[in-house]
Amino acid sequence: MLVGEELLNKARSLSNRPEDDIARGCGYVGPSGRLLKKSFYRALVEAKAEAQGWQLPRSTTNSGGGGSRGRQAEFRTRVHGNGNLLIGHAYTRRLGLEPGQEFRIELNRDSGSISLSPLDESAMESTPDQVQPFSESQASDMAGVE
């Protein structure tokens, strides 16, 4: 990935091309082939600031050592337009859950809460205040599958 004056020169030479082509031409492509636009734009701003003799605030530069930590867990979610409720990797990782693990979904009408319990013999017994999960036939009727 080009930085500094090299980046500015290459970006100028490709200025008649689409932005994605400029970023790609400057080497801002991840190992999976995904374009790293945020890194490209940040490097452009830093290179331009350096060329102009400007001092950028420390939080906007990569040299600060802090870097971006990505999305942080907010302990909030919402029901998506398709009706799905996504928990997310940040939460499953915190609980040490692994792909393929199975859980029983328990709905509590009184509190409006949803609980997940690991599937095992004792988890198949339910308490009276919980809504029973759909049977396979009820689930396929709900989905419109015969």
Image (cartoon, rainbow, N blue to C red):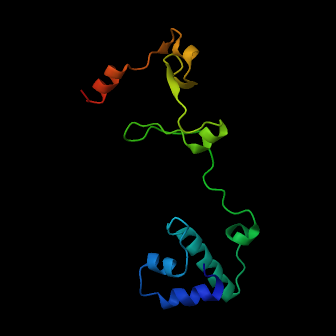
Indicate left or right for 76 with 15 as reference: right
> Of all residues shown, which one is farthest toward the left?
146
Residue 52 percent location from the top left of the image = 66, 88
Residue 90 visible somewhere in the drawing: yes
Query: Which residue corresponds to the image point at 52% horizontal and 86% vertical from the top-left?
Result: 11
- For the C terminus, the quadrant is top left
Q: Nearer the viewer, residue 121 or 69?
A: 121
Query: Which residue corresponds to the image point at 55% horizontal and 39% vertical from the top-left?
Result: 99
Residue 113 percent location from the top left of the image = 53, 24
Residue 7 percent location from the top left of the image = 59, 85
Residue 74 visible somewhere in the drawing: no
- For the N terminus, the quadrant is bottom right
Q: Which of 80 and 55 is in front in this view?
A: 80
Image: 103 above or below 3 = above
Q: Which of 146 and 51 is in front in this view?
A: 146
Query: Which residue corresponds to the image point at 52% horizontal and 29% vertical from the top-left?
Result: 102
> Of all residues shown, which one is farthest toward the top?
128
Indicate left or right for 23 with 90 as reference: left
The tally of labels here is: 0
Say which quarter of the image contains residue 121. top right
Residue 123 percent location from the top left of the image = 56, 17
Query: Which residue corresponds to the image point at 53% horizontal and 10% vertical from the top-left?
Result: 127
